[in-house]
Amino acid sequence: MKKEDYELVENYMLSCMEDSAHDKEHIYRVLYHALDIAKTEEGVDFDILISACLLHDIGRKEQFTDSAVCHAAAGAEKAYAFLTAHGFAERFAGAVRDCIRTHRFRKCAPPQSIEAKILFDADKVDVTGAVGIARTLVYKGEVAEPLYTLREDGRVSDGTGDGQPSFLQEYKYKLEGIYSHFYTARGAEMAEERKEAAAAFYRALYREADMAYKTGRKNLRDFVEGM
């Protein structure tokens, strides 16, 4: 890829980034993860891969504005329109569009090309480990969701089977099981290296929150009559 083409695509990406959990640094990490993975695969078109990585989240604004919109689908069409408008071949723009359209975890739209599979894995690696925990917390703060919820008996829920959204619920529903959903061996390996960092944070947060309620309520009863 020529430097001027890279900078053209990069600058368009930068103009679209507004979500702090999916900011430009997330984009660069996904790109760098993808290049790492791509070195272990055959037949990768690096121009398609780099462009798809840079543009994969440009539809986030549309989804944030309207939750019914899929950012992968919206971003795919925006990327195709941008690339064709700036002289890139329709075949190239279509391949980038397909990568972006299938980078989100959905059974109905699995990635097909090697570039799409690498983007999928690179994006998922950035949801694993300490970075994945931090990004999830940032997002939960943006949408005003709590760290945890309480069970009917007043104890802190560990997130299992919760109907109400929270960080602990997100961990049990999504983050804990993401490590088995990779298409490339290198992507799976990168994720596995990060797994314990995320699990340790989850365990520590639940333990500390739960202990605060256990001891706190007992202590409160000592000082408030009728509790």
Image: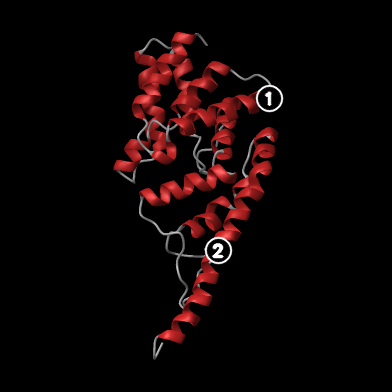
What's the residue type where badge 1 is placed? Glu
Give the residue at x 37% y 38%. 19
Give the residue at x 57% y 25%. 115
Expressed as whole percent of the image width and height from the top left, the position of residue 125 reads 58, 38
> Which residue carries the number 2 mark?
206
What's the residue type where badge 2 is placed? Tyr
Q: Nearer the viewer, mark 2 or mark 1?
A: 2
Callout 2: 10 Å neighbours few (<14), some, many (20+)? some
Q: Nearer the viewer, residue 161 or 219?
A: 219
The residue at the far front in this view is 223
Provide the secondary structure element on which disc 1 rests: loop
Expressed as whole percent of the image width and height from the top left, the position of residue 168 reads 51, 59
Q: Residue 41 got which mark?
A: 1
Q: Nearer the viewer, residue 9 or 225?
A: 225
Give the residue at x 44% y 64%. 163
Expressed as whole percent of the image width and height from the top left, the position of residue 124 reads 56, 39
Provide the secondary structure element on which disc 2 rests: helix
- Contact, mark 2 vs mark 1 (Cβ under 8 Å): no
Query: In the rendered view of the protein, which quadrant contains the C terminus?
Result: bottom left
Q: CA distance from mark 2 to mark 1?
A: 39 Å
Name the quadrant containing residue 70: top left
Q: Nearer the viewer, residue 159 or 220?
A: 220
Q: In the figure, 46 relative to 204: above or below?
A: above
Give the residue at x 47% y 73%. 151
Q: In the figure, 154 relative to 27: above or below?
A: below
State the count of labels.
2
